[in-house]
Image (cartoon, grey):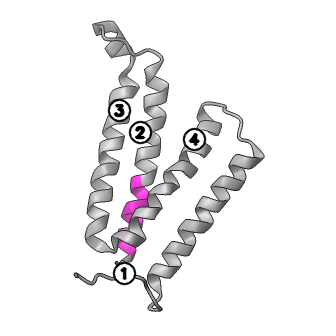
């Protein structure tokens, strides 16, 4: 099996991926209200097209990140998308965030931090 240590550029790329996909989903949400399968509906729903573009850029960033690190370290960072979506929906969509959601987001951030730290240590690792 190929042994790769996760490099900082891999983590930076995967975090950028989560930001781009979160913004992409926000734009899809904003644009879908005007989306219809008519010429006028497609023109009015331009945020949908921009959202797809952001989502695609996120996919490219994720794919590139895998070149620079361990999959088991990098992929869990994808859960940060939930954090960004929660923040973006509160700021741009004026959605209410409950205390339980804040606890959930905090757990996600702590989990990602733990995985990031574990990926940097040389201690015992379970491999399948």
The residue singled out by tag 1 in the image is 127
Q: Among all residues in the image, which is located at the extreme front? A: 128
Secondary structure type for disc 2: helix
Q: Nearer the viewer, mark 4 or mark 1?
A: 1
Q: Are marks 4 and 1 in contact (CB under 8 Å)?
A: no
Residue at 49% from the left image edge and 35% from the top image edge: 26
What's the distance in space between the residues labelled 4 and 3, CA to CA?
Answer: 16 Å
Image coordinates of residue 13 in percent, x first then y, are: 36, 62
What's the distance in space between the residues labelled 3 and 2, CA to CA?
Answer: 7 Å
For the C terminus, give its image quadrant. bottom left
Secondary structure type for disc 4: helix
The residue singled out by tag 2 in the image is 24
The numbered mark at residue 11 is none
Secondary structure type for disc 3: helix
Q: Is residue 82 magenta?
A: no
Image coordinates of residue 64 in percent, x first then y, are: 26, 62
What's the distance in space between the residues labelled 4 and 2, CA to CA?
Answer: 11 Å
Q: Are marks 4 and 3 in contact (CB under 8 Å)?
A: no
Nearer to us in this view, 98 or 24:
98
The magenta segment is: 8-17
Residue at 27% from the left image edge and 53% from the top image edge: 60
The residue singled out by tag 4 in the image is 88
For the N terminus, give its image quadrant. bottom left
Q: In the picture provided, is 113 more to the left or to the right than 107?
A: left
Of the image marks 4 and 1, the number of the one nearer the N terminus: 4
The numbered mark at residue 50 is 3
Q: Is residue 15 magenta?
A: yes
Examine the rendered structure and indicate whether residue 76 appears above or below residue 59: below
Nearer to us in this view, 1 or 93:
1
Residue at 34% from the left image edge and 74% from the top image edge: 70
């Amino acid at each position: 099996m190929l042994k790769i240590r996760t490099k900082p550029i891999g983590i930076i790329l995967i975090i950028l991926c989560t930001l781009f996909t979160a913004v992409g989903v926000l734009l899809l949400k904003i644009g879908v209200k005007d989306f219809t399968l008519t010429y006028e509906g497609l023109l009015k729903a331009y945020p949908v097209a921009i959202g797809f573009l952001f989502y695609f850029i996120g996919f490219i960033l994720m794919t590139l990140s895998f070149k620079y690190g361990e999959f088991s370290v990098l992929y869990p960072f994808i859960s940060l998308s939930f954090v960004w979506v929660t923040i973006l929906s509160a700021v741009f969509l004026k959605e209410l965030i409950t205390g339980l959601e804040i606890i959930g987001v905090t757990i996600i951030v702590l989990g990602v931090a733990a995985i990031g730290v574990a990926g940097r240590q040389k201690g015992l690792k379970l491999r399948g």
